[in-house]
């Protein structure tokens, strides 16, 4: 589907590049700031260094209030691969670690280390890897990480993560396009420090071993093109390419498309199409870190806009408050309806709510327009469906439909229109005749969708928890019911065996009575054995009668006695009775003894059986 | 330091707002209107004045009723443009109340009652034109022959007089003005052809009339070319995209060619269809109305091509000699469907099956 390596090389050789759809051509205003060399700024009184400067996770502070820090000394450390440390940009005392207004569109505060500078700019010891080819690659990557380098062109992705790719790199693309109007920081950097940028590229080439290096510069920067070409002329597989000026040609996805015709898959990374991209500023910082051992503590910032008397590019220490830089460039606004200071360019930058905001690693420009220089903030008109936005969109979205659904909060449909592929370049809103802040609507929609997703996940988890709990409770309830049922059955069983036992007991008692009666008879007529027989018979009858009455009694008892908790015990007690009785009658005549013994044995056996049954039921 | 304003990016704008877009379209109408004045008299200018005034006044009234920001809405020039497009579509000497009714209908009913600019489903000027054509067929078909062919010449004052009273200052009626040197009332080239065909004549016989020069209607051809120039200006100025006009013209030409190949005596040649009637004006100025047209480039090609096809089909078998308004209105209804099925492939996405 995409052009292979050879075709791309052929195209590059013939300078016949591809194009991306849409795009706009705003006036550059680059000459406001790019005519003088990058200047140094006096040290501010205090530096405000936010702990988090990039996409990724927070790091752990390793300094305390009151500590003295030197320029280049790390202030944070982290074992997470997604974190890079921050460094003191100059020497002084840490006077505060608290929340300070951050360099973010929200204007919210973030944890910031405040350093009161002593003006000496004492340097922390440096650890250069001058002869870096002799080091392990992991050491170089670690050094890049420890130098606190994150992407200096855009989002601020930690550079060492990118540089640690195992996938083959066909094209290492160095982005010197700088397509946003007004900004000339990369332009000046390339013109003045092309050699060091080359050194940075060399380090990357050593790490990544790309087949080809492309240094892309927009054709509105002829001087930068020339210096970069000179700096790279000895390297065979480095090519400096002039690309047509069109916004947003410097966007990562767009530049890859222009140079290679390849498209980074949605939700994918440039490496998926064999490309890796670094900003020229990042390359400069890498050279600083590896060759000099210096961490990232300063960067070029374009100070521009007609509200500045001396627009220019400056080396700004990370953490310098914007007010200090504005003073340096002689900020002198006239009466303005909408006074604005924009961090970044006019297309993708954000307005600052305070001039106390510090410069961070991604700050490439401070734009202070004069009255009428940039359009005023107006109410939007109705969309006339002209689709100028769609014509301008570099990623072939339908901004107007996305706007429609975002505004109506029909977020699912908005997502169907690939809302999340929007790169927020602002080309759509730039051309919108109804002056609709389209990107603003997309941002709101995106954040609300993300929020909804988080909440949905939460709800999903809560639902699972709730259902699991319900299941568990239901199971427990069923188990309880089953237990109750079995217990009831056991009781019924016990009741049945109870009747039998009582039967036996009554029989035993009757027998015992009969024996006693027999004894009596024995004593009276000991010489008349014939009588004994009769007596015996009588006793048997008596026993039978007694048994019958006992049975009747038991039956009666069974009907009345519903809660027969005591049944087992009573059975036992009654079952024991015949034994005791039988023992008491040991001194009886041999015949009687024998009979009694047998009766006792039978009674015992029956009692045992009853007992066994009882325990069995109980066990169940 | 004064309090800083906070706004969402981008902070930059190309400076072309809705009003500017509408004004450019109005300016691009000038060549065509000049040609109309040259060949058909000053009527079109008077109509433009009446229509624009009526449309803007109607817009003010209804926007006030809807309690909107009147000044901002009037400054988008959409009402004025709708009025102008209606004015160049109706016969130049149509009575003043035709222009007023049409303009008010376009603004109040077709546009504002649907929610105002951006929400109307139909092209206001064309919906008004269709309403007028159906309601007042006599007035709406009383086209003048080109001034080179008329017996009576008439001045600007005559035009004003006729539009407001029905008679010129000399007392001639529109009917009389329409008479050629031979005293026979003349119609538009397409109208004439339709009538002749219905009476059993062939196309070749029909185009022998005075109003034709070969298959080119006199006056109409030049007006069409003048609007073509204006249309090219619009494309150059990036006010409209080429997709709708080009596909519409190609759609019409192909359909006309097929019919012409089937029976050249019953169906006019593609060239005849192209150069007579309002096909070209419609292609660049009417069908491209952003609000009611398709919005994706692929969709625009379908939208335009189908309008072109409809125009020729209606001209061939319908009761009306010209058909741009009907075709546009018909396709306006299909726009949501077309848009839905012609979404472009987004960067980094595979082609959807």
Image: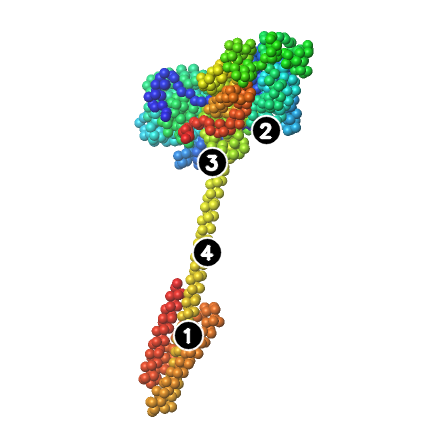
Residue pointed to by mark 3: A64
Cα gap from disc 2 to disc 4, whole angstroms: 61 Å
Is circle 1 on the same chain as circle 3?
A: yes
Q: Which comes sooner in the sequence, label 4 or label 1? A: 4
User: A499 or A250, which is in the foreground?
Assistant: A499
Q: Which comes sooner in the sequence, label 4 or label 3? A: 3
What chain does badge 2 belong to?
A: B
Cα gap from disc 2 to disc 3, whole angstroms: 65 Å
Crowd tier of the residue under label 1, counting other residues whose Cα lies within 10 Å: few below 14, some 14–19, many 20 or above: many
Q: Which comes sooner in the sequence, label 1 or label 3? A: 3
Q: Is residue A449 visible?
A: yes
Residue pointed to by mark 2: B114
Q: Secondary structure at mark 1?
A: helix
Point out the frontmost of discs 2 and 1.
2
Q: Secondary structure at mark 4?
A: helix
What chain does badge 3 belong to?
A: A
Question: How many numbered tags mark residues here?
Answer: 4
Residue pointed to by mark 1: A502
Crowd tier of the residue under label 4, counting other residues whose Cα lies within 10 Å: few below 14, some 14–19, many 20 or above: few
Image quarter of the N terminus of chain A: top left
Q: Residue at x 52, y 16 (%)?
A: B200
Quadrant position of residue B106: top right
């Amino acid at each position: 589907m995409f052009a292979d390596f050879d075709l791309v090389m052929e195209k590059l050789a013939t300078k016949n590049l591809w194009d991306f759809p849409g795009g706009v051509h705003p006036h550059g205003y680059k000459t406001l700031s790019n005519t003088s060399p990058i200047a140094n700024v006096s040290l501010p009184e205090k530096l405000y260094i936010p702990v988090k400067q990039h996409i990724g996770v927070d790091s752990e502070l390793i300094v305390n209030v009151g500590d003295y820090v030197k320029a280049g000394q790390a202030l944070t450390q982290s074992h997470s691969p997604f974190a890079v440390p921050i460094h003191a940009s100059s020497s002084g005392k840490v006077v505060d670690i608290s929340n300070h207004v951050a360099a973010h569109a929200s204007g919210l505060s973030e944890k910031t280390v405040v350093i009161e500078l002593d003006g000496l700019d004492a340097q922390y010891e440096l650890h250069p890897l001058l002869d870096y080819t002799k080091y392990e690659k992991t050491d170089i990557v670690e050094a890049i990480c420890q130098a606190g380098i994150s992407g200096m062109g855009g989002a601020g992705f930690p550079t060492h993560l990118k540089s640690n790719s195992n996938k083959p790199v066909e094209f290492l693309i160095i982005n010197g396009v700088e397509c946003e109007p007004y900004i000339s920081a990369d332009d000046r950097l390339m013109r003045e420090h092309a050699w060091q940028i080359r050194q940075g590229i060399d380090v990357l080439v050593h790490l990544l071993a790309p087949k080809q290096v492309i240094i892309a510069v927009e054709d509105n920067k002829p001087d930068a093109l020339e210096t970069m070409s000179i700096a790279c002329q000895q390297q065979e597989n480095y090519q400096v390419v002039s690309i047509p000026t069109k916004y947003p040609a410097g966007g990562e996805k767009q530049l890859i498309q222009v140079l290679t015709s390849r498209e980074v898959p949605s939700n994918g990374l440039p490496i998926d199409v064999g490309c890796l991209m670094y900003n020229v500023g990042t390359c400069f910082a890498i050279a600083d870190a590896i060759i000099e051992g210096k961490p990232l503590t300063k960067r070029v910032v374009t100070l521009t806009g007609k509200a500045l008397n001396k627009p220019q590019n400056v080396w700004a220490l990370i953490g310098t408050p914007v007010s200090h830089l504005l003073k340096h460039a002689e900020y002198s606004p006239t009466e303005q309806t909408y006074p604005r200071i924009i961090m970044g360019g006019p297309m993708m930058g954000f307005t600052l709510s305070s001039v106390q905001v510090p410069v961070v690693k991604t700050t490439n420009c401070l734009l202070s327009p004069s009255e009428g220089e940039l359009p005023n903030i107006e109410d939007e008109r109705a969309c006339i469906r002209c689709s100028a936005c769609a014509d301008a969109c570099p990623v072939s979205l339908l901004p107007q439909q996305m706007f429609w659904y975002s505004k109506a909060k029909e977020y699912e449909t908005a997502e169907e229109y690939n809302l999340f592929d929007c790169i927020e370049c602002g080309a759509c809103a730039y051309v919108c005749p109804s002056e609709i802040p389209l990107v603003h609507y997309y941002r709101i929609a995106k954040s609300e969708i993300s929020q909804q997703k988080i909440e949905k996940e939460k709800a999903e988890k809560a639902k699972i928890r709730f259902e699991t709990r319900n299941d568990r409770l239901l199971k427990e309830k069923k188990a309880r019911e089953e237990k109750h049922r079995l217990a009831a059955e056991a009781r019924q069983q016990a009741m049945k065996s109870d009747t039998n036992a009582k039967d036996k007991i009554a029989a035993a008692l009757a027998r015992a009575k009969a024996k006693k009666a027999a004894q009596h008879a024995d004593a009276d007529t000991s010489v008349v054995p014939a009588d004994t027989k009769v007596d015996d018979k009588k006793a048997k009858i008596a026993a039978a009668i007694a048994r019958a009455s006992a049975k009747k009694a038991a039956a009666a008892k069974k009907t009345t006695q519903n809660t027969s908790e005591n049944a087992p015990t009573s059975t036992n007690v009654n079952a024991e009775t015949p034994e005791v009785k039988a023992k008491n009658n040991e001194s009886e005549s041999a015949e009687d003894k024998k009979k009694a013994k047998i009766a006792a044995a039978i009674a015992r056996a029956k009692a045992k059986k009853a007992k066994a049954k009882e325990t069995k039921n109980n066990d169940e | 330091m004064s309090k800083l304003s906070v706004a969402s990016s981008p902070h930059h704008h190309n400076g072309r707002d809705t009003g500017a877009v509408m004004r450019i379209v109005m300016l691009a109408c000038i060549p065509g209107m000049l040609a109309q004045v040259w060949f058909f008299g000053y009527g079109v200018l008077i109509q433009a004045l009446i229509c624009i005034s009526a449309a803007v006044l109607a817009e003010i009234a209804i926007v006030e009723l809807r309690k909107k920001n009147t000044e901002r809405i009037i400054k988008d020039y959409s009402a004025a443009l709708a009025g102008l497009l209606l004015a160049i579509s109706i016969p130049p000497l149509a009575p003043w109340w035709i222009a007023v009714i049409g303009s008010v209908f376009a603004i109040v009913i077709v546009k504002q009652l649907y929610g105002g600019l951006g929400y109307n489903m139909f092209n206001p000027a064309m919906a008004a034109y269709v309403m007028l054509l159906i309601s007042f067929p006599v007035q709406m078909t009383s086209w003048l022959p080109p001034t080179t062919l008329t017996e009576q010449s008439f001045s600007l004052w005559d035009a004003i007089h006729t539009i407001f009273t029905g008679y010129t200052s000399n007392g001639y009626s529109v009917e009389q003005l329409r008479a050629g040197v031979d005293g026979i009332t003349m119609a538009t080239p397409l109208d004439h052809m339709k009538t002749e065909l219905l009476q059993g004549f062939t196309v070749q016989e029909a185009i022998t009339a005075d109003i034709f020069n070969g298959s080119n209607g006199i006056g109409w051809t030049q007006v069409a070319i003048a609007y073509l120039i204006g249309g090219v200006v619009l494309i150059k100025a990036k006010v409209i995209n080429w997709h709708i006009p080009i596909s519409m013209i190609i759609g019409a030409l192909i359909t006309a060619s097929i019919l012409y190949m089937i029976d050249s005596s019953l169906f006019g040649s593609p060239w005849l269809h192209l150069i007579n009637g309002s096909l070209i004006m419609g292609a660049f100025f009417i069908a491209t109305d952003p609000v009611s047209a398709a919005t994706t480039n692929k969709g625009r090609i379908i939208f335009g091509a189908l309008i072109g096809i409809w125009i020729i089909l209606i001209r061939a078998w319908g009761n009306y000699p010209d058909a741009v308004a009907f075709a546009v209105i018909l396709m306006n209804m299909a726009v949501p469907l077309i848009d839905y099925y012609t979404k472009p492939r987004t960067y980094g996405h595979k082609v959807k099956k």
